[in-house]
């Protein structure tokens, strides 16, 4: 189950990765015409409308993305099936159609059906399509129906299945929707405290990948909050909309990079160079793009107490930003790119104060992390107990040229996983290799760590994650070459 949920989290990253395109288009458009929001400038209107085209159809992106990500073959018919499933359920359960099915006036239809076109429904559609694809994409029908065999059968089955799901959701969705709204309302009614609690749980759930489910409630239009969409569309309340995003900027742009500096300064003298290569690259990724996993996984399992401290500080940061109504937004993550793009948006409120807050949090992270590492001798990067052989392997690996370093890294990681005899499948998300193995006892974690990866996460008897960082795609491709996939 845990592996399934983590694969779902990975699949959700595919549609999320599209959102920066909307950020760039709308950010530039609002900069050109910050007052008229496109009404006073043709170029601005062109860019803003193009960005809106992405944001307005996020549920469809999730339906397609999940359908692709949760199938073994990552094939096009799976994506088509996800789209078909989404169109069926959202049409059948639209307000007007529900009114017809229940033989009542549209005004009396439960408000839940007015919000049926949402990310939650998109995810369900994608999951149904992926499940059917994995099971029936190789089915051979009798000769009379042979044309519809295999992959062509999946969209048809998806449509039929989603009709059944629609009947179920006709009764279930109002209950689910009310629960989601209550959950979101509970946090939103707590104001700054609610934002702080959300920030804390957002970080705590990172190791499991379940933070995506929590994010969907607050960032998208699942429970009526839609913090990202409303902020970028300028349809919220200035100083309020964006409260579930703003507090991340001080953490990702300043706090985590400062933590990386503290870990570098506390690394063993003979390991500082190795620690720097890992920590500084991860810190830059966090600052510039808001991709934090390479840095977080570098100490998450080595020093879990530090990670809990990080989660608490993240919650405090969101609470402070919400208290003072400082807002900025992101479409991908809270890095410099999204900060610059969002700072000129109509609903951005004193975003420069987030930079001031970030400097303060940077100091807190640096001195607190440095104190805790030294006080409790946490084995952060550069302080682990490693044997001489592993150190020599790492040094030798660093001597390879940049051109073949991914191939060398992939070869050593694959060998550490047990090679063809032990590895059954290889996949990747934005920052991690996700591998299924036959026997976890045959995995040599020391060999894998000698490549300089930020960390390793064993998530079950047969599932292991190797945290590589933003270059994971290049490493994954090299591993697939070794496996001849």
Image (cartoon, rainbow, N blue to C red):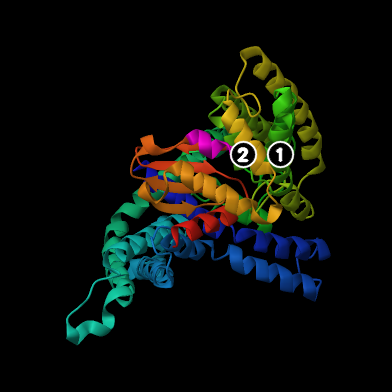
- Of mark 2 and mark 1, the one earlier in the sequence is 1
Count the numbered circles shown.
Answer: 2
The residue that label 2 is drawn on is 452
On screen, residue 195 versus residue 130, left or right, reads right
Quarter of the image where one finds residue 278 = top right
Q: What residue sits 30% from the left and 64% below the top? A: 132
Location of the C terminus by quadrant is: bottom left
Q: What residue sits 51% from the left and 45% below the top? A: 413
> Which stretch did the figure color magenta?
445-454
The residue that label 1 is drawn on is 277
Q: Nearer the viewer, residue 82 or 42?
A: 82
Q: What residue sits 66% from the left and 17% below the top? A: 372
Q: What residue sits 34% from the left and 73% below the top? A: 155
Is 448 included in the stretch rendered in magenta?
yes
Is 398 included in the stretch rendered in magenta?
no
> Answer yes or no: do the residues labelled 2 and 1 have beta carbons within 8 Å?
yes
Location of the N terminus by quadrant is: top left
On screen, residue 42 versus residue 432, left or right, reads right
Instruction: Give how far across and how far down residue 188 sits, in percent.
Output: 56, 39
Instruction: Give how far across and how far down residue 50 sits, in percent.
Output: 67, 71
């Amino acid at each position: 189950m845990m592996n399934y949920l983590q694969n779902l989290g990975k699949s959700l990253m595919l549609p999320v990765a599209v959102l920066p395109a909307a950020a760039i288009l709308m950010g530039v458009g609002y900069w050109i015409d910050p007052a008229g929001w496109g009404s006073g400038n043709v170029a601005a209107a062109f860019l803003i409308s193009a960005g809106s085209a992405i944001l307005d159809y996020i549920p469809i992106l999730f339906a397609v993305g999940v359908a692709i990500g949760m199938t073994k073959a990552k094939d096009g018919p799976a994506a088509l099936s996800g789209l078909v499933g989404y169109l069926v359920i959202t049409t059948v359960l639209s307000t007007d159609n529900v009114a017809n099915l229940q033989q009542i006036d549209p005004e009396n239809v439960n408000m839940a059906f007015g919000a049926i076109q949402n990310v939650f429904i998109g995810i369900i559609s994608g999951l149904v399509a992926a499940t059917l694809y994995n099971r029936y994409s190789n089915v051979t029908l009798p000769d009379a129906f042979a044309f519809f065999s295999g992959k062509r059968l999946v969209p048809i089955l998806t449509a039929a299945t989603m009709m059944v799901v629609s009947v179920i959701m006709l009764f279930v969705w109002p209950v689910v929707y009310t629960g989601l709204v209550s959950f979101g309302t509970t946090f939103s009614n707590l104001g700054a405290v609610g934002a702080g609690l959300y920030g804390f749980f957002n970080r705590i759930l990172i190791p499991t990948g379940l933070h995506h489910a929590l994010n969907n409630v607050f960032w998208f239009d699942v429970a009526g909050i839609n913090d990202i969409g409303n902020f970028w569309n300028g349809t919220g309340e200035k100083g309020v909309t964006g409260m579930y995003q703003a507090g991340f900027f001080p953490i990702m742009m300043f706090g985590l990079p400062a933590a990386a500096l503290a870990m570098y300064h506390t690394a063993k003298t003979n390991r500082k160079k190795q620690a720097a290569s890992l920590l500084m690259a991860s810190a830059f990724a966090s600052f510039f793009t808001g991709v934090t996993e390479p840095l977080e996984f570098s100490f998450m399992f080595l020093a879990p107490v530090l990670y809990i401290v990080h989660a608490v500080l993240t919650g405090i940061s969101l609470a402070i930003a919400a208290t003072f109504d400082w807002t900025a937004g992101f479409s991908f993550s809270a890095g410099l790119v999204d900060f610059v793009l969002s700072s000129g948006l109509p609903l951005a409120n004193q975003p420069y104060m987030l930079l001031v807050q970030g400097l303060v949090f940077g100091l807190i992270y640096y001195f607190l992390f440095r104190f805790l590492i030294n006080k409790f001798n946490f084995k952060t990067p550069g302080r682990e107990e490693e044997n001489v052989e592993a150190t020599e392997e790492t040094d030798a690996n660093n001597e390879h040229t940049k051109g073949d370093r991914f191939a060398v890294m992939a070869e050593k990681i694959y060998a550490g996983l047990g090679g063809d005899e032990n590895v059954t499948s290889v996949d990747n998300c934005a920052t991690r290799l996700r591998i299924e193995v036959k026997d976890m006892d045959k995995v040599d974690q020391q060999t894998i760590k000698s490549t300089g990866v930020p960390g390793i996460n064993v998530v079950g008897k047969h599932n292991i994650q190797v945290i590589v960082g933003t270059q994971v795609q290049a490493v994954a491709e090299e591993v697939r070459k070794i496996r001849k996939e």
